[in-house]
Every structure is written in C-alpha cells, then in structure tokens.
Image (spheres, rainbow, N blue to C red):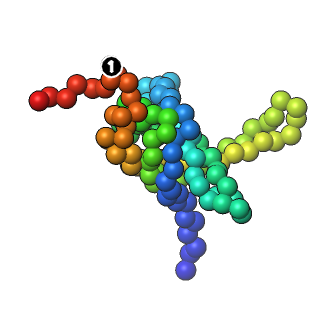
Amino acid sequence: MAQRNINKFIGTGRLTRDPELRALPSGTSVCEMRLAVNGMGRGGEVGYIDVSAYGANGEACSRYLSKGSKVGVDGRIEYGEWEADGGGKRHSYSVVANTVEFLTPRSEEESEQPADEREPVAA
C-alpha cells in the first residue's frame, strides 16, 4: 500500500493586522493576512501564521475582514526557503487557504467601526 502525504491545516485565530490585497502578474488577486493562534507552543503561547487567500476568496477577505477579526482557515501548508542577506539559508512556513470562515459576529464588527464607516442598512 502506497503511503500518502497529507498536507492539511485547520485553525482559528484573530487577524493581527488588516488584510492586504494585491494582484499577481497573472492578474489573480491574493490577500495576505497574519493569524494569531493560541496554544501553539509548549506553554500555550500565541503563535503567528501567515495566510494567503487567492481569487474571489481573497477579495472577500480584503473587503470584510480587519485587524482583530476572528476567522477559521482550512488550507495547506507551504514551505519557503531563501538566502539571507548575511549568508545562510532562511525558511518559513505559511498557509494557502482553501476556505476562510468569518467568525466575528457582524454586530461585533459594526460596533468597532466609527458610525461614518458603517455600510448603510436598508429599512
């Protein structure tokens, strides 16, 4: 029986800054976020994970999420490696999101925004 590699990340946390949306040379949108996740270390410390969401998923994240928003992320882990300025190799792990669930209740998000930045509500 062949052994399969499983590359799966599922986690929840809060965004440490506003999402940043940019376009790749191909025209595809990518939204980059940083997620704070509790309990990642031995003593239950907070860990930080870089998350990228592509296409319509990323555009929605950019539009509706902000610093402090609670999200659930389902995706795959990606490994990166590069040469450091002072020599030697550096590496990092990040997550490419398949789905991002918005977990902050809408009423909580609205109460954090100044009244002039809220979207109008039809009566």
Q: Position of residue 55 (x, y in %)?
A: 40, 35
- Residue farthest along the top direction in this orientation: 116
Q: For mark 1, does the 10 Å Cα neighbourhood hold few (<14), some (14 to 19), or many (20 or more) residues? A: few
Dividing the picture into quarters, in which one does residue 51 lie? top right
- Residue farthest along the bottom direction in this orientation: 1
Instruction: Check the image and report above or below for 111 versus 99.
Output: above
96 left or right of 59? right
Numbered marks: total: 1
Residue at which label 1 appears: 116
- Image point (44%, 47%), residue name: 71
- Image point (57%, 65%), residue name: 5
Q: Position of residue 11 (x, y in %)?
A: 50, 56
Residue 47 appears in the rendering = yes
The answer to which of 3 and 60 lies nearer the viewer is 60
Quadrant assignment for the N terminus: bottom right
Dividing the picture into quarters, in which one does residue 109 lie? top left
Q: Position of residue 33 (x, y in %)?
A: 53, 37
Instruction: Check the image and report above or below for 84 versus 2.
Output: above
Residue type (three-letter) at the residue carrying disc 1 = Asp
- Image point (56%, 38%), residue name: 16
Q: Position of residue 8 (x, y in %)?
A: 52, 59
Could you say whether the residue bearing mark 1 is in a helix, strand or loop?
helix
Residue 26 appears in the rendering = no
The answer to which of 73 and 37 lies nearer the viewer is 37
Instruction: Check the image and report above or below for 112 versus 44.
Output: above
- Image point (88%, 35%), residue name: 87
